[in-house]
Structure formats: C-alpha cells, structure tokens
Image: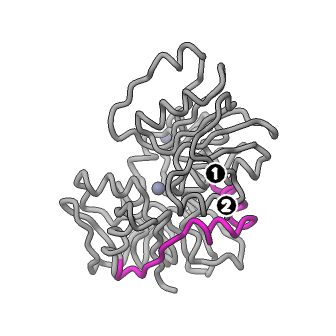
Amino acid sequence: MRAVTSSQGSVFVGDHDEPAGTGELITVTSAGICGSDLHLIASGLSGVILGHEFGGFTTDGTLVAVRPTGECGLCPQCTSGFPHMCHQAAASLHGTSINGGLAEFVRVEPSRLVPVPAGTDPATVGLIEPLAVVVHGIYRVPLISGMSALVVGSGSIGLLTAAVLADKGINVDIVCRHPHQFEAAEKLRVNAVSKHATNYDVSFDAVCTQESLDMCFNATRPRGSVVEYGMIWSSIQLKNQMMLKEISLVPSMFYSHNHEQNDFEDAVDMLVRHPELTTTLITHRFSLEESVHAFAVANDRQAGAIKVHIFTNL
Ligand SMILES: [Zn+2]
Ligand SMILES: [Zn+2]
C-alpha cells in the first residue's frame, strides 16, 4: 500500500506492507495534517507512518473516526476515569508512536473507533480529532451560557474553539490577523476582532507562544481561567499578571473518553450539526500521492491554509 513517512525533516510517499496483526483494518478516507506533525517532522520524527487525525471505513462498511490515543486499562489513571493521562496514551499514539492514517490502510484497536452517522461525507471525518481536542479544552473549565470568552489564534484549533463556544451560547471573540482568517470566522458566524477587549471570563490560547499566553492573561478578568491547548514547543515564562489576578492556567491534553464524558462523541455531534465547519476549515485537499506538496502547503504561511486534508480511497 502507499503511505506517508518522514525522515531527516523531509516527507516521503512510498510503498509499505499492508498492516498485519490485530485490530480492525480501516480503509482510510480522510486524514488531516496538524501543526504538531510539522514540529515533529522538523525535529526528526522517523520510522512511523504519519497521521493522527483520520478516519475511514471498517471492513463491514461502518464509517468511523479514530481516537489515536491508547490506554493500558490497569493503571490508576485508567481505573480512575482519566485514561487519556495513562502513559500508553502517548506511547501508543497513531502517527507518532505507532503507524498512523496517512496511508491507504491502518489497523486500529476496536476501542479507539468512534462511529460516525451514515450519510456523513467520508472525506471530512479527519476533522473529528481536532474537534475532540477543542471539546476537551472547553470542558476543562466551568462555562455557562452567557459567559464571555476570547480565543487567541485563528488556525484550525482556534476557529474550531470559537465555533464550539458559540454553539454553547458563549459570547466569543476570536483574534484574527489575516484576511482569510476574518473570512473564515465570518462563515462560522463568530466575532472576529483584530484587537481584543478585556475582562473575559475565559481565554483560550490556541497558539502557545509567549506572546499569545501574555495576551490571554491580559484579556482575562481577575479569577478567570486561561486554557492552554496543545504542546509548548519552546519554554514560556509565567508573568505576575497571573498571580495578581489569581487566574487559573488550565492545560488541555488529548481527549476524555470515560463514562461521563466522551469528547469524540461530542465532536462527531458537532461535525454533523455544523456542516459549515468542514466547508470553512478544510481549505486544501490533496490525494495521498500529492502528500509531499500537501505538507509544503501546510508549512507555508503565505498559502492561506487553515486545514490541509489528504483524501484516500475515494
Ligand atoms: Zn492534531
Ligand atoms: Zn493506564
């Protein structure tokens, strides 16, 4: 089968054996390129098929999204309802630790499969993973309808955050810089601003740099919260703003999937109810064979990409 790997900072499309062993064989239809893929490739990731944002069809024809994280099922984190904090979550992550979905086929443990309603466009199911990231971050803070929120960063995670917050009745502003980001916010019917106001109940940092985190602390009211998404790739200083205003800094990692909360199921629900998410967010689509170019587009700030998707077997 054809699949995408990386070595010494470059991306390759090549021939690989079809996946053997246990797990459900998934015929991949849709896979997204993520900012974290770009960071990991630049830092030398190799030896694994890329892609942690993907979905496709099981052998019986069910359309599924895939939760890429694993779990051991036995450790205190697993048995206390937080399997996403298990050491196995990252150690068996598709696309970084085990083979991912930028391929024609991939084997996936059945417990990681999330059914998607029939009739959903199979080319869009790769967007469910970043939506689950966003749902998880929003659940990390107590939010009730009518509260105010700021989103800093208007890439895919920022725009999805603003859309999910608006769906929950939160008054949300999103800081945008470039014309295509303002356009996307307008299509999602969320309020784009070039300069934020102050005293938001919660701010969401979808950039994870010193500048974006400082902006969140400046914009948040005393005793409010700042949610930090994703990975901090270079060290960041915490300033006295946080202390002086007693702001809670809330990290958000992966997605919950315990009895009370299943972020992937909520993400599927969001995708189905809001078709404008896929039409707005997936700005570029390429075939698997075009993956080298697709990664170049995802890496090029001038290209105006929000989410670059690879379609396979369609
Ligand atoms: Zn991702
Ligand atoms: Zn565990």
According to the picture, the residue beneath numbered tag 2 turns out to be 186
119 vs 128, left or right, is: right
Q: Are marks 2 and 1 in contact (CB under 8 Å)?
A: yes
Q: At label 1, which amino acid type do we have? A: Ala
Q: Residues within 10 Å of mark 1 (few under 14, many from 20)?
A: many
Q: Secondary structure at mark 2?
A: helix
Please state the extent of the stretch shown in magenta in the rendering: 263-290
Is residue 101 or residue 71 the one in the foreground? Answer: 101
Q: Residues within 10 Å of mark 2 (few under 14, many from 20)?
A: few
The alpha-carbon separation of the residues under discs 2 and 1 comes to 7 Å
Q: Earlier in the sequence, mark 2 or mark 1?
A: 2
Q: Residue at x 48, y 30 (%)?
A: 214
Q: Is residue 245 visible?
A: yes
In the rendered view of the protein, which quadrant contains the N terminus? bottom left
According to the picture, the residue beneath numbered tag 1 turns out to be 192
Q: Is residue 293 above or below residue 244?
A: below
